[in-house]
Amino acid sequence: MSLSNDTIQSKLTEKFGDVLTHWEEPYGLLTFTAPKEFNLKVLNFLYDDEELGFRFLTDLTGVHYPDRKGEELCVVYHLHNLISNVRVRMKVYTNIEQPDIYTATGLFSGANWMERETYDFYGVNFLGHPNLKRVLNVDEMDYFPMRKEFPLEDQTRIDKDDEMFGR
Amino acid sequence: MTDHNNIRLPEGSIEKETTTLNLGPTHPATHGVFQNILELDGERIVKAESTVGYIHRAFEKIAERRPYNQITTLTDRLNYCSSPINNMGWHLTCEKLLGVKTPKRVDYLRVIIMELARISDHLICNSIVGVDTGAYTGFLYVMQYRELIYEIYEEVCGSRLTTNMGRIGGFERDFSDAAFTKIQKFLDEYPGVLREFENLFTRNRIFVERTMGTGAISAERALNYSYTGPNLRAAGVDYDVRVHSPYSSYEDFDFIVPVGTTGDNYDRYQVRNAEMWESLKIIEQALRKVQEFKGAEAEIFHADVPDYYLPEKADVYTKMEALIYHFKIVMGETTIPAGEVYQAVEGGNGELGFYLISDGGRSPYRLHFRRPCFIYYQSYPELVDGAMLSDAIVTMSSLNLIAGEMDA
């Protein structure tokens, strides 16, 4: 059983037309972009289709691109077909003012905490998530620390008390 | 009732029929800092809620400012029971991005170290399951051999727990003769120890009764929860990254992927034990392959990629080129291609993935660790639903949850 990237691409284009864009194969991993209204439809199709059968969610994470107007936040899904041993990567972009994306928890129970983590760090609001609250940071936090505008500590700062920090 | 006026109980707490119990974050039986708020009916768990993040250190954020060779130290601190696997995983990710091809000897040396790390990881997990079921002896006994593994790390890289081992392209120095002697010693002595360890637990009545049938998960649920590693294999799915997408020349080795059937604590224990035997087989094969190299090939311990491989210190002091490359690498002036990489390795407790986006700058644009523990742990409420409190403790240790990895 082999499932080539071309087959996946042609099956997906056949189903969704040119809604799916930015087909790429960096380092052999088929990558494409889906509009945010379509993310669940594509995930469902990938899951249900007999031949595709992407039933394993390897990873779900977010990326922040502050320079891309209207699509600042990106959610990246890594899916795996364990039988044919093929991976695909799907990207969904959303704007930062209203970062709403449908949740994948209905399809994958494992997406629960991965989405909570993405919410925690990027503020992506997963619509329909059963328990969307912070997972690694404290609940009282009112910012999203992995966004690029959130600064790291200035390495040249000199106001630290050396006696306390033992430098 | 007037003399109880100074005691204020929460609303509805008298009428409530269940007890709320806070297990963790510093409970001695949780083996790490995670909290579980359990709702108990007698001794049975009716509801569990997990809280993590007590040792979150923002590695992904820190990594966005560090040059590539400095991120290795961050990966150590993920799953600190098998840090060399994390180090190698990170180097493999960089090598994939940079298009570095490592020589066979480097691959085999890496395999030896990774399998030793796997043994130490499984050893700790299984012996901790023993401790939680009331047998401390196994834990203390095998610690001696984990110590031997740590001594091997020490011979190879100089440190023991957070190893920071290797560099992009290979190792910082060749394995010493003492390292090979110690690996051979380990191979000679460890089978006897593992056999004794198995004698202590595998058919031990108390151990079997405590672990069999508790904390079980079906293969279907395990896949839905994105389980990987020994926990998934215990449920009966033979998914192993080493076989499915071989890295570091794992395709050259002959080994079996052990699987369980029921996915309960006992099967997890059995799968880990069987994997230790397989790891021993792999180390033996790798050691033989390493010894087969002759002449100049037998001295290779890194790929010839001066642009990325941090040169030896003696060369930096005496050779012009080495000094230039050293300066460029340390100051982050090397050219890094822009690109997107996902590289997975079979970590001690599952598929450890590195998702790296590079924009060509000196440090990653985005680095995400796919941490198997974090993904397992969300299924914990489902695993312990309706179980006894004492079984919940065993389930927690048998999932091999490492707080450092979970919280990244």
Image (spheres, rainbow, N blue to C red):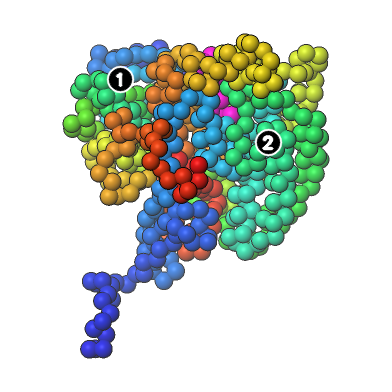
Q: Are marks 2 and 1 on the same chain?
A: no
What's the CA distance linking mark 2 and mark 1?
45 Å
Image quarter where the C terminus of chain B lies is: top left
At x 24%, y 37%, the residue is A125
Task: Please identify the quarter of the rendering in which residue B258 is found.
Answer: top right
Q: Mark 2 lies on which chain?
A: B
Of the pair B160 and B277, the residue shown nearer to us: B160
Rendered location of residue A15, percent (x, y): 28, 18
Q: In this view, does B380 lie to the left or right of B292?
A: left
Overall secondary structure of the magenta section? helix
Does residue A85 appear in the picture of this structure?
Answer: no
Rendered location of residue B274, percent (x, y): 66, 42
Q: Is residue B92 magenta?
A: yes
Check the image and report above or below for A39 versus B41.
above
Q: Does the magenta stretch include residue B170?
A: no
Does residue B266 appear in the picture of this structure?
Answer: yes
Instruction: Mark 2 vs mark 1: give the one in front.
Output: 2
User: In this figure, which residue is indicated by the disc labeled 2?
Assistant: B158
Rendered location of residue B235, percent (x, y): 52, 43
Which three-letter amino acid code belongs to the residue tagged 1? Thr
Image quarter where the N terminus of chain B lies is: bottom left
Element under disc 1: strand
Which three-letter amino acid code belongs to the residue tagged 2? Gly
User: In this figure, which residue is indicated by the disc labeled 1?
Assistant: A33
Q: In this view, does B267 lie to the left or right of A4?
A: right
At x 77%, y 40%, the residue is B186
The residue stretch that appears in magenta: B88-100
Check the image and report above or below for B109 versus B385.
above
Of the pair A56 and A156, the residue shown nearer to us: A156
Element under disc 2: loop
CA neighbours of label 2 inside 10 A, class few (<14), some (14 to 19), many (20+): few
At x 50%, y 57%, the residue is B30
